[in-house]
Image: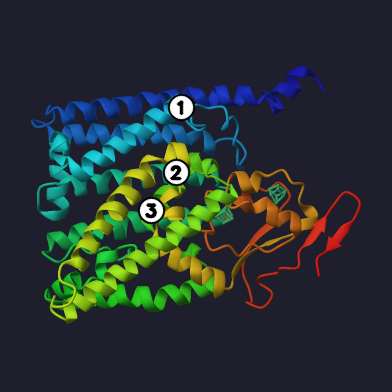
Amino acid sequence: MSMSKISTIQPTLSLAGEQAAQSVLQKLGGICVAIAILAMVAAISGAGSEYPLLFLSIIIAMFTLGAISYALPYYSGSAGIRNNGIMFKSMTNKGTIAWILGIALTGFYIIIYWFPWMFEGLIRIFDPLSLLLTNQPANQWFMYGAFYTLAVLTMGIRFIGRYRHSRYHVIRTISVMFFQLGFAFLIPMVLKKLNEPEFYFSYFWPLKYNYLFPSDVSSLMSTGHLGVFMVFWGAMMTFIATPILTYKYGKRWYCSWVCGCGGLAETAGDPYRHLSDKSLKAWKIERWMVHSVLVFITITTLLLWLNSYFKGGILGSVSGAFAQWYGFFIGAVFSGVIGVGFYPIMGSRVWCRFGCPMAAVLGLFQKFKSRFRITTNGGQCISCGNCSTYCEMGIDVKWYAQRGQNIARASCVGCGICASVCPRGVLKLENGNEAGRINDKPITIGNNNITVHL
Ligand code: SF4
Ligand code: SF4
């Protein structure tokens, strides 16, 4: 075979060559994102007040084009996961660009929560869209919801291209995009337009903790039949659907298919999934933190109901203070500022892993009463460590794979990336019989022998 023939079939065997071809598109994407950011800065300074629709269109179009340019290389060539150079890029390996992005995201959240007036000019350019969807001018939460949804949709397109060989990943990504756009953005906004309560049907207690607070329950109930249905929906999802679905499918039905926090982590957070801390210390901290948050919100909710029952006579303002502290530290600081702002430094599931009380509840069911497990064919494992590296929840998957032990960890969100990056097909996500789900008699395969631990 002549050299020209080789170059026709396979232009280059060099990973660097392939990356160079991608980087042209990615540079174009970078220019689009830079234009969008410039337009945002101009809008913040008030330049968009005359032409809000023009500024809004430029920002949305440039962010979308930027993300698509970033995604396109994943749709060309053969399907399959490529993590080329991920450990060498400043953006994905805690370099200067990652720190700048982390600080910018954190700053964005701090302003949104506590100094929204600083974004007044930017918020105003969302008025045309807000008036269309809600009949009201935009506020910082409308703007935030719009950006959040845009991030899930555009980075979802990238994610689908990146994992397009896997039906599981394609379908679950379409699912999170659907729930974010429909259930977490359009439906609540249209409800507002109809003068109904702004209700998020895809969030339940304890994640949306106030949905079972007595004040919210009575205010919803007072709005009529739809409000009563909302209360019923929230309680039914928390107390009936969550245990049943988690028993059948594990926590993945929510964390990787429905939840908006998980949706953002899986799409916009995908480039950072390998940054999760895999140490035993992190696992210990995770268990303490996530269950403490669950205990805190459970006590707060019970206190509020007791207070409501006794008409404030016994607990006075204590329960209200609990709720306020929870809202500040967990609802704002943890889930927003740290949860998303620290993506480029601590990985994409910091909130899901260390702070989300819904993840804690789902995890308890998954650990003790579920059919879900990841089975491991230990004999095939070559200890490459890909699975552990790309587990966003910091699970040392390889440790289980080497022992041929099923993985039934409370924190696993069933994203399935560990199975997808395994070059040997060792791992499989399954919903089987409960019997034998936790096999604590693993097999160790050594150089000279195979040991069965009886
Ligand atoms: S163990 Fe696998 S399926 Fe579970 S969270 Fe980690 S990568 Fe996802
Ligand atoms: S990715 Fe597969 S082969 Fe590599 S360590 Fe994990 S289970 Fe073993």
Residue 126, x across and y down, in percent: 17, 41
Report how many numbered discs are placed on residues in the image.
3
Which amino acid lies under the numbered mark 1 shown in the image of this protein?
Answer: Gln
Q: Which residue lies furthest to the front in this view?
A: 314
Q: Name the residue under label 2.
A: 269
Distance between mark 1 and mark 2 Cα atoms? 17 Å
Mark toward the start of the polypeptide (2 vs 3): 3
Residue 148, x across and y down, in percent: 31, 46
Label 2 Cα neighbours within 10 Å, binned few <14 / some 14-19 / many ≥20? many
Residue at (13%, 78%) from the top-left corner?
313
Figure check: 191 above or below 446? below
Q: Would residue 100 be seen by someone viewing this image from the given angle?
A: yes
Label 3 Cα neighbours within 10 Å, binned few <14 / some 14-19 / many ≥20? many
Residue 325, x across and y down, in percent: 25, 57
In the structure shown, which secondary structural element does the residue marked by tag 3 occupy?
Answer: helix
In the structure shown, which secondary structural element does the residue marked by tag 2 occupy?
Answer: loop
Left or right for 356, reference 415: left
Left or right for 229, reference 7: left
Residue at (31%, 70%) from the top-left corner?
299
Which amino acid lies under the numbered mark 3 shown in the image of this protein?
Answer: Cys
Distance between mark 2 and mark 3 Cα atoms? 10 Å
Identify the mark at residue 261; answer none if there is no mark.
3
Figure check: 433 above or below 411? below
Q: Mark 1 points at which residue?
A: 26
Mark toward the start of the polypeptide (1 vs 3): 1
Mark toward the start of the polypeptide (1 vs 2): 1
- In which quadrant will I find the N terminus? top right
Which amino acid lies under the numbered mark 2 shown in the image of this protein?
Answer: Gly
